[in-house]
Amino acid sequence: MSELGAVVLIVEDEPQMRKFIRASLMSHGYRVIEADRAAQAVMMLTSHNPESLLLDLGLPDGDGIELTKQLREWSQVPIVVLSARGREDDKVAALDAGADDYLTKPFGVNELLARMRVALRHGQNRDGGSAPQVLEFGELKIDVVRREVSREKERLHLTPIEYKLLLLFAQNAGKVLTHRQILKEVWGPAYATQTHYVRVHMAELRKKIEADPSRPKLLVTEPGVGYRLRDRS
């Protein structure tokens, strides 16, 4: 389904915040359904089959992180969590539980819309969309078939770990990945606590793909949470 007309379920118990999100999404062509409780959210998800879910972490009848874990047992709907400012632990826990992204309150309309576009693309990919053989991010190009990476038409020589890291981010472009998620995908579950592995290899990868590694434009840090490869849009 295209972005225009996509159904978004807002799960938020604060009426004013819910009103702001509803107005922002509907003015840009989204269809909106709403819930203010975790139990109601589950019912709405099963009865309306929305394309994406905006989920507040603090709900009167349950915890948003636990709800995310529950939903991931049977649903792959893209989940964007709404997080209070500065609560990095909650963000990490939500992402590790299966959320696709997060928005820190307060947030603006443009950021909200950008996150929704990325979430919907994640949902389309999960629904069986064919993966492109060449991924492009500005001057950076990844040929998945040949396992070749180039920047400004110059081939880059990446180590196997660096290539695996870059491909993981490219396949999740726009999505924040926590240190734990990166470690499990690249090194395996046994390395889930070895966060220094990520820091060291990310620094080396940035030296090769960034024009200015000290001011990265592609692989950006999400403080206290992880990293994100900027979406192509």
Image: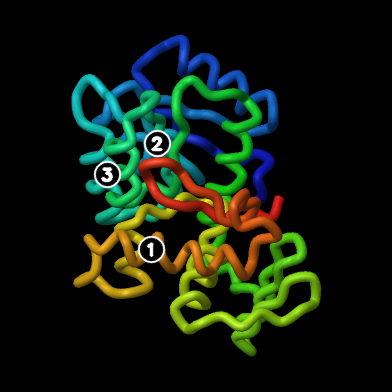
Q: Is residue 15 above or below residue 10?
A: above
The reply to whether dot 3 and dot 1 touch (C-beta < 8 Å) is no
Label count reads 3
Disc 1: CA contacts within 10 A as few (<14), some (14-19) or many (>=20): some
Helix, strand or loop for disc 1: helix
Q: Which mark is residue 29?
A: none
Task: Give the left or right position of residue 35, taking residue 59 as reference.
Answer: right
Amino acid at the residue labelled 3: Ala
Helix, strand or loop for disc 3: helix
Q: Residue 74 appears at what percent x and percent y?
A: 29, 55
User: Is 55 or 3 nearer to us in this picture?
Assistant: 55
Closer to the observer: label 2 or label 1?
1
User: Is 175 or 180 nearer to us in this picture?
Assistant: 180
Q: CA distance from mark 2 to mark 1?
A: 24 Å
Amino acid at the residue labelled 1: Val
Q: Residue 36 appears at what percent x and percent y?
A: 34, 21
Q: Which label's residue is closer to the chain start, 3 or 1?
A: 3
Q: Is residue 189 above or below residue 19?
A: below
Image point 40% across, 36% down: which residue?
81
Q: CA distance from mark 3 to mark 2?
A: 11 Å
Image point 53% across, 24% down: which residue?
107
Answer whether residue 36 is visible to the viewer in this image. yes
Which residue does the numbered mark 2 point to in the structure image? Answer: 81
Q: CA distance from mark 3 to mark 1?
A: 18 Å
Tell me which corner region of the image, top left, top right, bottom left or bottom right, holds residue 146: bottom right
Which residue does the numbered mark 3 point to in the structure image? Answer: 93
Q: Which mark is residue 198?
A: 1
> Furthest-top residue in view?
16
Task: Give the left or right position of residue 187, taking residue 124 as reference.
Answer: left
Image point 47% across, 70% down: which residue?
165
Q: Residue 94 appears at what percent x and percent y?
A: 31, 43
Image point 41% across, 30% down: which residue?
82
